[in-house]
Image (tube, coloured by chain):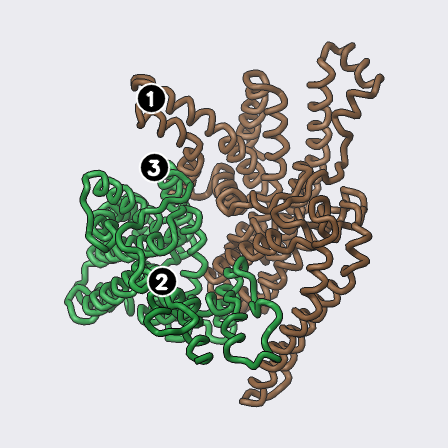
Amino acid sequence: MDFLNALVAFLNFVLVPGTAYGAQLALGALGVTLIYGILRFSNFAHGDTMAFGTMFVILITWGLQGLGVSFGPLPTALLALPFGILVCAAFLLITDRFVYRFYRRERVKPVVFVMVSLGVMFIMNGLTRFIIGPGDQRFADGERFIIRARDFKEMTGLNEGLAIKTTQGITLVTAIIVVAVLFWFLNKTRTGKSMRAFSDNEDLALLSGINPERVVMITWLIVAALATVAGTLYGLDKSFKPFTYFQLLLPIFAAAIVGGLGNPLGAIAGGFVIAFSEVTVTYAFKKVAGYVLPDALAPSGLAQLLSTDYKFAVSFVILIIVLLFRPTGLFKGQSV
Amino acid sequence: MSLRDASFFALIAVLIVGTGFIQSWNTALLIVNMGLISAIMALGVNIQWGYAGLFNVGIMGFVALGGLASVIVTMPPTTEAWAVGGLRVIGGLLLGAATIVAAILTYSRMRAGRARNITMLVILIGGFFLFREVYDPAVVAIEKVNPAGTGYLGGLGLPVLLAWPVGGVLAAGAAWIIGKTALGLRSDYLAIATLGIAEIVIAVLKNEDWLSRGVKNVVGLPRPVPYEIDLQNTPEFVERVTNWGFDPTTASSIYVKLSYSVLFTIVLVILLWLAQKAWNSPWGRMMRAIRDNEVAAEAMGKDVTARHLQVFILGSAVCGVAGAMMTTLDGQLTPGTYQPLRYTFLIWVMVIVGGSGNNFGAVLGGFLVWFLWVQVEPIGLALMQLITAGMADGYWLKKHLLDSAAHMRLLTMGLVLLLVLRFSPRGLIPEK
């Protein structure tokens, strides 16, 4: 019984939140890795792209709520999601047309692209704060829990409850659907194959008649979708604040690099590696240890390895270790 | 310096004097002082980017470390806190450092294989728990000592001006650790590593209350210049300024700001002179050779990674000095106010706008962009008032636009950066 209690406590506080967070990071890292593979630069504006797309989802959600539209037990934001993606995609395409395309034609060094993305980051961040403000926004509605802690306790007779929030369930389901569609697209369709060819060897891809502008345009569309979905899921699960999204840049980059930049499968693996390490290292294991260990050995403190405020340190340390020992990441990524 | 370059600096002077006449001399001097500090930060970034092409987006971290230095150097020590746990905290930190050194030694000395992996794990995990065992009780004890007033170890109680070079040294130490790990890898990796270290430095400042009181802030740092109130109570000062026809209160605050300006200008001139000397020396030519073609420089027998490490440390140290100066100017260390957009990316805008690879350009960019940063807010507000003038009072859009005027800054900075990168990528004063 004690062992089951420990297991449930672990599931409730580490595995379930870690999985949801991992899925969110994986979607973000997929966007970063796709841009890196096709456009060949690290996009520092990605966190703010997520915030930008999410902002429109929130605005449209509010509009729908005002009209009395709801999605039953599911959050209304899911209905608003496609519109948010459209707005975000339009903005990214405009940015590409007026900003990035010039540098692509000039064939500048990757670091100049990074700097340009800083400028885009400033603008997107400014717009987001201008339109919705820098504060916290909550926009989750509908049913809050799939399983409530109390119901779970009554059902199983355990001391520990297991709560699964609707947003966590939605995160996982949405992430699986999005990733499945993305991989189907990249591996089975003609356009997807041309994108992979372009990423593997630009010169050969151009020789075989692939239109680079089309590949770039589709990449931005996919990135807009991924970023908006990732941002909306994160916002539903926690809350929306522009600065938090900017700070997500670090774990997202860490995930993409750990998996190997330019490698979509790696980005997903990296997202979960970072998320689970973060949650595990910052979780206070007092409860779990109290069930498993005999009383004499039970920890007196919280048994927390690092305080939650140092979660950035976790992604950072993993990043440094991977960079030192496997610079191309766990799955082989590109290096320029 | 050509006539064109000089005219840019003249423009800055006109803008600042204009602010003095239109707004107030206090505002103008505030802009000058922060402009001087920004110029030093931009100089530091230019040493990394302009000389060697290193992309550092962790400036905020180095600036904050400089700020920490001014607390550690200038504040009086809390003797009681030292008595209950000072040595123990330091012992704990040394244990932590020893663990990492032992792990690195094991890695380099033992042969690869399972034995090495297990030894490393044992050292790291054992070391971590040992570190927590020594360190945690000491921290609790220190933070219990008068938490409302001190609750931290305090500083060394040394002269303020000493804090500035110490800030440079602290930042240089952090830069050494980062450089050792991330240099030699691809350029974007350095960027991400520095982004991470900056966040971690801020997290440490916010949470390690024993070190710098965390978010409770350290206020009332000693100053290298007299206090306004003391000046107002000095009869000679009051008499002299009244003879010149000034109000003593205003005069005292202007006097203090001017003293800061003089100190900061001296630092800027020294650093600028050193940077110019380095740029024109064989060392500077070698750095540019490495920047422009690493492979060729390596073929000539230059150790690219070692030179990169050197220049990375130097540039970060300059940022650390600027950070210490800024905290001295503010008279307080407030970890909550360090924002990457303000302390990292804004400095980048300064360097790019001013002209990367030109020290005078960096200084110019520091002043110009800082001036913009300060003035965009009132200008943005005025613009919004103009736009919303036709709307009825209480209309939601009018209120929203007026409230959001403050966020015009980021938008403007992004626009300036993109326009300069596109149409004048070499900046206002380009590299020669």
**Apparent colour of chain A:** green
Identify whether A259 is placed above or below B228.
below
Mark nearer the N terminus (3 vs 2): 2
Chain letter for mark 1, please. B
Identify whether B222 is placed above or below B135.
above
**CA separation in Å, label 3 and label 2:** 26 Å
Identify whether A333 is placed above or below A312.
below
**CA separation in Å, label 1 and label 3:** 18 Å
Q: Tell me the residue that label 1 is attached to.
A: B394
Chain letter for mark 2, please. A
Which secondary structure, mark 3?
helix
Disc 1 versus disc 2: nearer the observer? 1
Q: Which mark is residue A29?
A: 2
Residue B215 vs residue B57: left or right?
right
Task: Tell me the residue at 31%/59% (across/down).
Answer: A145
Is the residue under label 2 in contact with that under label 3 (CB below 8 Å)? no
Q: Amino acid at mark 1?
A: Gly
Chain letter for mark 3, please. A
**Apparent colour of chain B:** brown
Which secondary structure, mark 1?
loop
Q: Position of residue A230 (x, y in %)?
A: 32, 57
Q: Tell me the residue that label 3 is attached to.
A: A131
